Image (cartoon, rainbow, N blue to C red):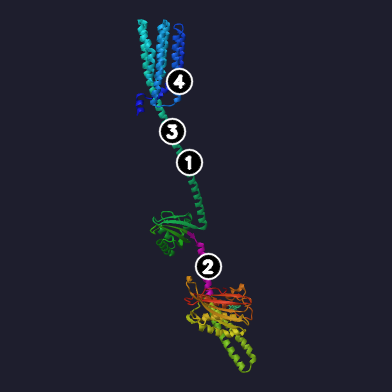
Amino acid sequence: MASADMHDREPYLAGRVRLIYSDAPATVAINLLNAAVLSFVMRGELPSPILLGWFTFIASVMMLRIALYAWHRRAGGYDEIEARAWLLRLAVLTTLTGIGWGVGCLVVMSEAPPLHKVFTAFVLGGMAAGGLPSLARVFVTYLLFVIPVLGPAVLYFAWQGGEIGWSMAVMGTVLLAFLLMTGKRQERVVLEAVRLAGENRGLVANLIEETEKALEAKGRAEDLNEDLRNEIADRERVEERLRDREKALANAQRIARLGSWEWDIVNDRIVSSEENNRLFGRDMNATAYDYDTILNIVHAEDRERVDAVIRDAIAQCKPYSCDYRIILPDGSEKVIFEQADIACDSAGRANCITGTNLDITERYEVEQELLAAKFQAEEANAAKSQFLANMSHELRTPLNAVIGYSEILKEDVEERGQSDLAPDLERINIAGRHLLQLINEVLDLSRVEAGRTEFHLEEIDLTVLISEVAATVRPLVEVNGNRLILDIPTKPGRMRADATKLKQILFNLLANAAKFTDEGEIHFGMSRFHDDARTGGKEWIRFYVADSGIGIARDSLESVFVAFERTETGRDSKYGGTGLGLAICRHYSEMMGGAISVDSKPGEGSRFTVRLPVQAVDCRPARVAGAGE
Ligand code: ADP
């Protein structure tokens, strides 16, 4: 507040005071020079002590002025309030200087001759005028200087009187008034200059600040520009990569003949890839293509099915796949395999489908050809099986007659004592039976292959079935000096299966064991077991036939179940056989829901195992397989 008041009364005082202080060296030099010149000029006119005393006074004040100047410099910066103190110190010295000159010159003039008086008046005028530029910056300082300088001389001349005296007094007064006016004006000019300088400084500071801000903003803008340029470059690079990928994808789609598409269900708009357009022979991106338009491209016979598949997938919000034919604009057909995934909102409503279309026309045609070929092959195979079944049937009737008559004839010749004919009739009988077995087996296999094997599932009392099988096979086992050992639980229980086919399987295995074993043991066993509870706990029956016969080489273990396959040793004519028995066993076991396997070592024997469900539910239709299977 004090500073503000101060500023109002003496604006920019500190600045102005500092300016006056800065003139001190020049002021001191001029004062000393003028004092020296005046003393020199007046040396003959005045007593030396007076002159010396005066000069010493002026010089002392100047020394103080220099000391004050040095102090002021050391003090450095100060505010408007401190400026008053500095002004006061200065004013004291300038007043002393003024008094020194005014009073000194008065003494000189009172003693000096007229010319010296004029010279002195001239020096005083010069001093008064010379102080103006520096001291008038603070007018009061100049006032305190100029009045003591000129005042005594004016008074002196007025006191002298006379024409010259009064003239000098008037001129001195005019000069004083003029200097005071000029001083006042000078102070105003200085004030204005200082104010303008202050304003300029403010303006410059503002300008600098604004410029700095602008530069900063420019820097930021440049940074932003740089960022933007980098971002644009990045984006361009990404777009470039994207274009490359799109090109690669389009290429891959073209090579794979795989089109892709997206269907915005909400707006019923389709976005279709280049390859998809090529597949359909149309630009599916055109606005004309909506769901119904595209559905109309689908072959009329497939349309309803495809529509149902898609609608069902949308309703359930789940992926789908289907194949269908489409009609191209030129009327030709193409077969498409479509796969799609459906995007749904949180409420489960489908809003977009993304899918692929694969051109499978060639594959479809090949498949059709293959299917036709397969159908033909199956037809041919069925015809062959039918032929074999018929032939077997036709062969069996006369063969039974041959076997029957050979037995009757053998009995006849023995009764008539023509025993020499008996061995031939026996051979006819054996050959006939072998042929009959072969025909029966061919017939069974033909039925399997033709899918015409019939199963008659029934409840079987295993005690009865096993004892029947054992009784039938025992004489056969004992022919080669073998021993039949049964490993059957005391209560084997019951099972549901086709009894005839089960007996056929067991008899076949036991007959083979008897055939390929000499003077050994043949074990016939049975047990029941359950599947693991985790896999359903199903109940099974396991039959096994183990012998100590010739065994089977490891590499033949699988092929013994293939029709007409016989092992190296099995082919030996002494064993006889057709190579069909085990193939039929395998078919029957599998068709009743079970399996057959073998474990064997050449020279040590074989173990055949048949696993069947205790409850055969539904016998699977026969696998249609070629005779070479
Ligand atoms: P077949 O006995 O009429 O030749 P199979 O299909 O019953 O026809 O048997 C196929 C072949 O398996 C037999 O020829 C024989 O080589 C081999 N084989 C079957 N059972 C045995 C067995 N218990 N010991 C050794 N080889 C066997």
Dot 4 or dot 1: first in sequence order is: 4
Residue under label 1: 226
Q: Secondary structure at mark 3?
A: helix
Determine the residue positioned at 60% across, 93% down: 412
Q: Which residues are magenta?
A: 357-382
Q: Quadrant of residue 130?
A: top left
Q: Nearer the viewer, mark 4 or mark 1?
A: 4
Kind of residue sitting beneath label 3: Thr
What's the distance in space between the residues labelled 4 and 1, CA to CA?
Answer: 61 Å
Question: How far, Cα to Cα, is label 3 from label 2?
Answer: 87 Å
Q: Marks 1 and 3: which is nearer the front? A: 3
Amino acid type at mark 1: Glu
Mark 2 falls on what kind of element?
helix
Q: Of the residues shown, which amino acid type is indicated by label 4?
A: Ala
Q: Main secondary structure of the magenta part?
A: helix
Relative vertical location of residue 150 with respect to residue 84 in this rendering, above or below: above
Whether the residues at callouts 1 and 2 have beta carbons within 8 Å, the answer is no
**Can you tell me whether the CB of the residue at mark 3 lies under 8 Å from the nearest atom of ligand 1?**
no
How many residues crowd around disc 2 within 10 Å: few (fewer than 14), some, or many (20 or more)? Answer: few
Give the labeled residue for mark 2.
370
Q: Position of residue 231 (x, y in %)?
A: 47, 44
Tag 1, which secondary structure?
helix
**Of the residues under marks 1 and 2, which one precedes in the sequence?**
1
Q: Which residue is mark 4?
A: 67
The answer to which of marks 3 and 2 sits earlier in the sequence is: 3
Instruction: Quickly name the residue at label 3.
Output: 211
For disc 1, the neighbor class at 10 Å (few under 14, some 14 to 19, many from 20) is few
N-terminal of the pair, mark 3 or mark 4, is 4
Nearest to the observer: residue 402 or residue 560? 560
Spatial CA span between label 1 and label 3: 21 Å
